[in-house]
Amino acid sequence: MGFYIGLVHYPVYNKHGETIASAVTTLDLHDLARLARTYEVDRCFVVTPLEDQQRLAERVKAHWTDGYGALYNPNRKEALELLTICGTLKEAKDTITLQEGRSPLVLATDASPEGVKTLGYQEARGMLERAGGVFLLFGTAWGLEARSMAEADFVLEPVRGRGEYNHLSVRAAAAIILDRLLGRDG
Amino acid sequence: MGFYIGLVHYPVYNKHGETIASAVTTLDLHDLARLARTYEVDRCFVVTPLEDQQRLAERVKAHWTDGYGALYNPNRKEALELLTICGTLKEAKDTITLQEGRSPLVLATDASPEGVKTLGYQEARGMLERAGGVFLLFGTAWGLEARSMAEADFVLEPVRGRGEYNHLSVRAAAAIILDRLLGRDG
Protein backbone atom coordinates (compact mmCIF):
# COMPACT_ATOMS: atom_id res chain seq x y z
CA MET A 1 0.00 0.00 0.00
CA GLY A 2 1.33 3.42 -0.98
CA PHE A 3 0.91 5.98 1.78
CA TYR A 4 1.17 9.68 0.98
CA ILE A 5 0.66 12.81 3.03
CA GLY A 6 -0.11 16.36 2.02
CA LEU A 7 0.75 19.50 3.95
CA VAL A 8 -1.78 21.89 2.51
CA HIS A 9 -1.28 25.67 2.42
CA TYR A 10 -4.17 26.35 0.05
CA PRO A 11 -7.12 26.33 0.30
CA VAL A 12 -7.14 26.79 4.09
CA TYR A 13 -8.91 29.12 6.49
CA ASN A 14 -7.51 32.01 8.45
CA LYS A 15 -8.63 32.94 11.96
CA HIS A 16 -11.72 34.69 10.53
CA GLY A 17 -12.87 31.77 8.39
CA GLU A 18 -11.69 33.38 5.14
CA THR A 19 -9.98 31.25 2.50
CA ILE A 20 -6.28 32.01 2.21
CA ALA A 21 -2.96 30.59 1.05
CA SER A 22 -0.87 30.32 4.21
CA ALA A 23 2.87 30.92 4.38
CA VAL A 24 5.21 27.96 4.50
CA THR A 25 6.69 27.35 7.96
CA THR A 26 10.13 25.87 7.38
CA LEU A 27 10.03 23.95 10.64
CA ASP A 28 6.86 22.20 9.45
CA LEU A 29 8.77 20.93 6.41
CA HIS A 30 11.39 19.38 8.69
CA ASP A 31 8.93 17.91 11.15
CA LEU A 32 6.62 16.47 8.50
CA ALA A 33 9.54 15.04 6.53
CA ARG A 34 11.01 13.41 9.64
CA LEU A 35 7.60 11.96 10.49
CA ALA A 36 7.21 10.73 6.93
CA ARG A 37 10.58 8.98 7.13
CA THR A 38 9.81 7.50 10.55
CA TYR A 39 6.47 6.04 9.46
CA GLU A 40 7.78 5.04 6.02
CA VAL A 41 5.42 7.32 4.18
CA ASP A 42 6.15 7.22 0.45
CA ARG A 43 6.00 10.94 -0.15
CA CYS A 44 5.01 14.18 1.55
CA PHE A 45 3.49 16.76 -0.78
CA VAL A 46 3.89 20.38 0.21
CA VAL A 47 0.98 22.09 -1.51
CA THR A 48 1.11 25.82 -2.20
CA PRO A 49 0.19 27.81 -5.31
CA LEU A 50 2.41 30.75 -4.25
CA GLU A 51 5.57 30.69 -6.28
CA ASP A 52 7.75 32.45 -3.71
CA GLN A 53 6.62 29.93 -1.11
CA GLN A 54 7.36 27.07 -3.48
CA ARG A 55 10.85 28.50 -3.97
CA LEU A 56 11.33 28.79 -0.20
CA ALA A 57 10.31 25.17 0.29
CA GLU A 58 12.56 24.04 -2.59
CA ARG A 59 15.47 25.96 -1.07
CA VAL A 60 15.02 24.32 2.33
CA LYS A 61 14.80 20.91 0.69
CA ALA A 62 17.88 21.51 -1.48
CA HIS A 63 19.97 22.73 1.46
CA TRP A 64 19.42 19.47 3.30
CA THR A 65 19.46 17.09 0.36
CA ASP A 66 22.21 18.55 -1.86
CA GLY A 67 23.75 21.38 0.12
CA TYR A 68 25.81 21.62 3.28
CA GLY A 69 23.00 20.17 5.37
CA ALA A 70 23.30 16.81 3.61
CA LEU A 71 26.84 16.45 4.94
CA TYR A 72 26.09 17.98 8.32
CA ASN A 73 23.13 15.72 9.01
CA PRO A 74 22.55 12.72 6.70
CA ASN A 75 19.49 11.67 8.72
CA ARG A 76 17.84 14.91 7.76
CA LYS A 77 18.70 14.31 4.11
CA GLU A 78 16.87 10.97 4.19
CA ALA A 79 13.82 12.77 5.51
CA LEU A 80 13.78 15.93 3.40
CA GLU A 81 14.18 13.85 0.24
CA LEU A 82 10.61 12.71 0.78
CA LEU A 83 9.23 16.20 0.13
CA THR A 84 7.66 17.11 -3.20
CA ILE A 85 6.56 20.71 -3.61
CA CYS A 86 3.55 21.23 -5.86
CA GLY A 87 0.98 23.85 -6.75
CA THR A 88 -2.35 22.16 -6.17
CA LEU A 89 -3.93 19.24 -4.39
CA LYS A 90 -5.08 17.92 -7.75
CA GLU A 91 -1.48 17.84 -9.01
CA ALA A 92 -0.45 15.83 -5.94
CA LYS A 93 -3.36 13.44 -6.33
CA ASP A 94 -2.62 12.93 -10.03
CA THR A 95 1.00 12.09 -9.21
CA ILE A 96 -0.17 9.47 -6.73
CA THR A 97 -2.69 8.01 -9.17
CA LEU A 98 0.05 7.70 -11.77
CA GLN A 99 2.36 6.05 -9.25
CA GLU A 100 -0.21 3.62 -7.86
CA GLY A 101 -2.14 2.90 -11.02
CA ARG A 102 -5.38 4.00 -9.33
CA SER A 103 -6.84 6.85 -7.31
CA PRO A 104 -5.85 6.90 -3.67
CA LEU A 105 -8.29 6.87 -0.79
CA VAL A 106 -8.26 10.52 0.35
CA LEU A 107 -8.46 11.10 4.10
CA ALA A 108 -8.75 14.64 5.41
CA THR A 109 -8.01 15.73 8.97
CA ASP A 110 -9.70 18.57 10.81
CA ALA A 111 -9.83 19.82 14.36
CA SER A 112 -13.57 20.47 14.21
CA PRO A 113 -15.35 18.98 11.20
CA GLU A 114 -18.97 20.04 10.99
CA GLY A 115 -21.73 18.08 9.35
CA VAL A 116 -19.34 15.49 7.95
CA LYS A 117 -19.21 11.79 8.58
CA THR A 118 -15.96 11.26 10.44
CA LEU A 119 -13.94 8.08 10.59
CA GLY A 120 -12.47 6.71 13.84
CA TYR A 121 -8.84 5.59 13.96
CA GLN A 122 -9.62 1.93 14.48
CA GLU A 123 -11.99 1.96 11.49
CA ALA A 124 -9.36 3.81 9.48
CA ARG A 125 -6.65 1.26 10.32
CA GLY A 126 -8.92 -1.51 9.07
CA MET A 127 -9.54 0.44 5.89
CA LEU A 128 -5.82 1.01 5.28
CA GLU A 129 -5.22 -2.71 5.05
CA ARG A 130 -7.63 -2.93 2.14
CA ALA A 131 -6.79 0.38 0.44
CA GLY A 132 -4.58 0.52 -2.63
CA GLY A 133 -3.09 3.89 -1.86
CA VAL A 134 -3.87 6.49 0.78
CA PHE A 135 -3.48 10.26 0.64
CA LEU A 136 -3.75 11.87 4.08
CA LEU A 137 -4.26 15.65 4.16
CA PHE A 138 -3.20 18.08 6.86
CA GLY A 139 -4.30 21.69 6.67
CA THR A 140 -2.10 24.52 7.92
CA ALA A 141 -3.38 27.80 9.46
CA TRP A 142 -6.97 27.31 10.71
CA GLY A 143 -7.47 24.12 8.72
CA LEU A 144 -8.55 22.76 5.36
CA GLU A 145 -11.30 24.57 3.51
CA ALA A 146 -14.68 22.85 3.25
CA ARG A 147 -14.12 22.37 -0.49
CA SER A 148 -11.10 20.09 0.04
CA MET A 149 -12.90 18.43 2.88
CA ALA A 150 -15.80 17.62 0.56
CA GLU A 151 -13.44 16.11 -2.01
CA ALA A 152 -11.96 13.74 0.56
CA ASP A 153 -13.43 10.25 0.89
CA PHE A 154 -13.47 10.54 4.67
CA VAL A 155 -12.52 12.95 7.41
CA LEU A 156 -10.67 11.50 10.39
CA GLU A 157 -11.99 12.20 13.86
CA PRO A 158 -10.35 15.19 15.52
CA VAL A 159 -7.54 14.30 17.90
CA ARG A 160 -8.83 14.45 21.45
CA GLY A 161 -6.58 14.27 24.44
CA ARG A 162 -8.16 13.98 27.84
CA GLY A 163 -10.60 16.88 27.51
CA GLU A 164 -12.34 19.00 24.92
CA TYR A 165 -9.41 21.28 24.05
CA ASN A 166 -8.09 20.54 20.58
CA HIS A 167 -5.87 23.31 19.37
CA LEU A 168 -2.72 21.43 18.45
CA SER A 169 -0.12 22.56 15.97
CA VAL A 170 -0.28 20.81 12.60
CA ARG A 171 3.12 19.27 13.49
CA ALA A 172 1.81 17.71 16.69
CA ALA A 173 -1.49 16.62 15.16
CA ALA A 174 0.33 14.99 12.23
CA ALA A 175 2.62 13.14 14.64
CA ILE A 176 -0.29 11.76 16.65
CA ILE A 177 -2.40 10.84 13.63
CA LEU A 178 0.44 9.04 11.83
CA ASP A 179 1.25 7.13 15.01
CA ARG A 180 -2.40 6.16 15.47
CA LEU A 181 -2.69 4.96 11.87
CA LEU A 182 0.72 3.43 11.28
CA GLY A 183 2.57 3.16 14.61
CA ARG A 184 3.29 0.08 16.59
CA ASP A 185 2.46 0.91 20.18
CA GLY A 186 4.77 -1.16 22.41
CA MET B 1 -2.79 11.55 39.59
CA GLY B 2 -0.68 14.62 38.91
CA PHE B 3 1.02 14.50 35.52
CA TYR B 4 3.92 16.84 34.77
CA ILE B 5 6.25 17.20 31.84
CA GLY B 6 9.68 18.73 31.55
CA LEU B 7 11.24 20.22 28.44
CA VAL B 8 14.90 19.96 29.34
CA HIS B 9 17.58 22.27 27.88
CA TYR B 10 20.29 21.21 30.33
CA PRO B 11 21.96 18.80 30.70
CA VAL B 12 21.57 17.58 27.12
CA TYR B 13 23.95 16.43 24.40
CA ASN B 14 25.00 18.20 21.26
CA LYS B 15 25.72 16.45 17.96
CA HIS B 16 29.18 15.45 19.21
CA GLY B 17 28.00 13.92 22.49
CA GLU B 18 29.20 16.87 24.57
CA THR B 19 27.05 18.15 27.42
CA ILE B 20 25.51 21.54 26.66
CA ALA B 21 22.69 23.88 27.59
CA SER B 22 20.61 24.18 24.42
CA ALA B 23 18.85 27.34 23.29
CA VAL B 24 15.12 27.68 23.83
CA THR B 25 13.08 27.22 20.63
CA THR B 26 10.02 29.40 21.04
CA LEU B 27 7.91 27.14 18.84
CA ASP B 28 8.66 24.26 21.21
CA LEU B 29 7.14 26.27 24.05
CA HIS B 30 3.94 26.69 22.07
CA ASP B 31 3.75 23.11 20.89
CA LEU B 32 4.51 21.59 24.30
CA ALA B 33 2.07 23.93 26.04
CA ARG B 34 -0.70 23.09 23.55
CA LEU B 35 0.01 19.39 24.01
CA ALA B 36 -0.02 19.83 27.80
CA ARG B 37 -3.41 21.53 27.60
CA THR B 38 -4.80 18.89 25.22
CA TYR B 39 -3.76 15.98 27.43
CA GLU B 40 -4.63 17.82 30.67
CA VAL B 41 -1.07 17.80 31.94
CA ASP B 42 -0.84 19.73 35.21
CA ARG B 43 2.28 21.68 34.36
CA CYS B 44 5.05 21.84 31.79
CA PHE B 45 8.44 22.82 33.22
CA VAL B 46 10.84 24.54 30.86
CA VAL B 47 14.23 23.75 32.34
CA THR B 48 17.21 25.96 31.51
CA PRO B 49 19.94 27.40 33.74
CA LEU B 50 20.72 30.18 31.22
CA GLU B 51 19.20 33.40 32.47
CA ASP B 52 18.78 34.99 29.04
CA GLN B 53 16.95 31.87 27.86
CA GLN B 54 14.75 31.95 30.95
CA ARG B 55 13.92 35.57 30.16
CA LEU B 56 13.11 34.66 26.55
CA ALA B 57 10.77 31.90 27.68
CA GLU B 58 9.14 34.18 30.27
CA ARG B 59 8.63 36.84 27.59
CA VAL B 60 6.93 34.39 25.22
CA LYS B 61 4.72 33.17 28.02
CA ALA B 62 3.81 36.70 29.17
CA HIS B 63 2.94 37.82 25.64
CA TRP B 64 0.36 35.07 25.33
CA THR B 65 -0.96 35.06 28.88
CA ASP B 66 -0.99 38.77 29.78
CA GLY B 67 -0.07 40.63 26.61
CA TYR B 68 -1.73 41.17 23.25
CA GLY B 69 -1.61 37.44 22.49
CA ALA B 70 -4.07 36.69 25.28
CA LEU B 71 -6.72 38.77 23.51
CA TYR B 72 -5.74 37.65 20.04
CA ASN B 73 -5.91 33.97 20.85
CA PRO B 74 -7.46 32.93 24.18
CA ASN B 75 -6.88 29.23 23.37
CA ARG B 76 -3.18 29.90 23.32
CA LYS B 77 -3.42 31.68 26.70
CA GLU B 78 -4.98 28.56 28.26
CA ALA B 79 -2.03 26.55 26.98
CA LEU B 80 0.88 28.88 27.71
CA GLU B 81 -0.35 29.37 31.27
CA LEU B 82 0.75 25.80 31.94
CA LEU B 83 4.43 26.69 31.46
CA THR B 84 6.73 27.17 34.44
CA ILE B 85 10.28 28.23 33.66
CA CYS B 86 12.91 26.99 36.09
CA GLY B 87 16.66 26.61 36.41
CA THR B 88 17.18 22.94 37.18
CA LEU B 89 15.47 19.59 36.99
CA LYS B 90 15.78 19.32 40.77
CA GLU B 91 13.86 22.57 41.20
CA ALA B 92 11.06 21.22 39.00
CA LYS B 93 10.97 17.91 40.85
CA ASP B 94 10.88 19.65 44.24
CA THR B 95 7.93 21.76 43.08
CA ILE B 96 6.06 18.61 42.07
CA THR B 97 6.90 16.84 45.34
CA LEU B 98 5.57 19.83 47.27
CA GLN B 99 2.42 19.86 45.16
CA GLU B 100 1.74 16.12 45.33
CA GLY B 101 2.96 15.45 48.88
CA ARG B 102 5.39 12.82 47.55
CA SER B 103 8.08 12.32 44.94
CA PRO B 104 6.81 11.73 41.44
CA LEU B 105 7.66 8.72 39.33
CA VAL B 106 10.25 10.11 36.90
CA LEU B 107 10.08 8.81 33.32
CA ALA B 108 12.75 9.83 30.85
CA THR B 109 12.47 9.61 27.08
CA ASP B 110 15.30 8.98 24.67
CA ALA B 111 15.65 8.13 21.01
CA SER B 112 18.39 5.57 21.63
CA PRO B 113 18.87 4.59 25.27
CA GLU B 114 21.88 2.35 25.79
CA GLY B 115 22.31 -0.14 28.57
CA VAL B 116 19.14 1.00 30.32
CA LYS B 117 16.05 -0.98 31.13
CA THR B 118 13.34 0.60 29.02
CA LEU B 119 9.65 0.59 29.70
CA GLY B 120 7.06 -0.17 27.00
CA TYR B 121 4.02 2.06 26.59
CA GLN B 122 1.51 -0.54 27.67
CA GLU B 123 3.52 -1.25 30.84
CA ALA B 124 3.85 2.49 31.43
CA ARG B 125 0.09 3.04 31.10
CA GLY B 126 -0.51 0.38 33.73
CA MET B 127 2.02 2.05 35.99
CA LEU B 128 0.40 5.46 35.58
CA GLU B 129 -2.83 4.20 37.07
CA ARG B 130 -1.00 3.29 40.28
CA ALA B 131 1.44 6.23 40.41
CA GLY B 132 0.87 9.19 42.69
CA GLY B 133 2.47 11.72 40.40
CA VAL B 134 4.43 11.39 37.18
CA PHE B 135 7.19 13.61 35.79
CA LEU B 136 7.90 12.88 32.13
CA LEU B 137 11.14 14.32 30.71
CA PHE B 138 11.87 15.33 27.14
CA GLY B 139 15.39 16.32 26.15
CA THR B 140 16.06 18.96 23.50
CA ALA B 141 19.07 18.98 21.12
CA TRP B 142 20.57 15.45 20.89
CA GLY B 143 18.76 14.26 24.01
CA LEU B 144 19.00 14.02 27.78
CA GLU B 145 22.42 13.45 29.30
CA ALA B 146 23.11 10.05 30.86
CA ARG B 147 23.14 11.68 34.31
CA SER B 148 19.46 12.72 34.09
CA MET B 149 18.67 9.41 32.50
CA ALA B 150 20.21 7.63 35.49
CA GLU B 151 18.15 9.70 37.92
CA ALA B 152 14.92 8.70 36.22
CA ASP B 153 12.99 5.72 37.53
CA PHE B 154 12.48 4.40 34.01
CA VAL B 155 13.26 5.27 30.44
CA LEU B 156 10.44 4.89 27.92
CA GLU B 157 11.06 2.88 24.79
CA PRO B 158 12.10 5.00 21.82
CA VAL B 159 9.27 5.87 19.46
CA ARG B 160 9.43 3.58 16.46
CA GLY B 161 7.38 4.14 13.39
CA ARG B 162 7.40 1.44 10.75
CA GLY B 163 11.17 1.09 10.44
CA GLU B 164 14.37 1.77 12.31
CA TYR B 165 14.61 5.51 11.63
CA ASN B 166 13.92 7.50 14.78
CA HIS B 167 15.04 11.06 14.38
CA LEU B 168 11.91 12.95 15.28
CA SER B 169 11.75 16.50 16.58
CA VAL B 170 11.15 16.79 20.32
CA ARG B 171 7.78 18.34 19.43
CA ALA B 172 6.67 15.33 17.38
CA ALA B 173 8.08 12.80 19.85
CA ALA B 174 6.31 14.52 22.75
CA ALA B 175 3.04 14.50 20.81
CA ILE B 176 3.27 10.77 20.11
CA ILE B 177 4.39 9.81 23.61
CA LEU B 178 1.68 11.84 25.35
CA ASP B 179 -0.93 10.32 23.05
CA ARG B 180 0.37 6.80 23.73
CA LEU B 181 0.32 7.38 27.50
CA LEU B 182 -2.78 9.52 27.94
CA GLY B 183 -4.74 9.56 24.68
CA ARG B 184 -7.96 7.86 23.91
CA ASP B 185 -7.56 6.27 20.53
CA GLY B 186 -11.02 6.18 18.89
Image (cartoon, coloured by chain):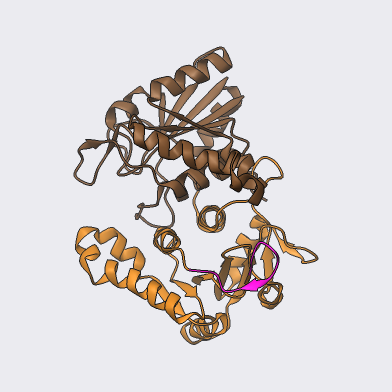
Chain colours: A brown, B orange
Left or right: A74 with respect to A59? right
Please tell me whether residue B18 belongs to the stretch shown in magenta: yes
Q: Nearer the viewer, residue A165 or B184?
A: A165
Residue depicted at 24% across the width and 61% down the height? B74
> In the rendering, at what x and y percent does residue A82 appear?
57, 34
Magenta span? B13-23
Looking at the image, which is closer to me, A155 or B8? B8
Residue B146 showing in the rendered view: yes
Q: Is residue A134 left or right of residue B27?
A: right
- For residue A99, side relative to residue B40 (left or right): right
When the figure is inspected, residue A7 is found, relative to residue B47, above or below; the finding is above
Which residue is located at x 33 percent, y 27 percent? A148
Relative height, residue B96 to residue A37 (above, below): below
The dominant secondary structure in magenta is loop
In the rendered image, residue B51, in percent from the top left (x then y), is placed at 45, 81
Say whether residue B15 is magenta. yes
Q: Is residue A140 left or right of residue B141?
A: left
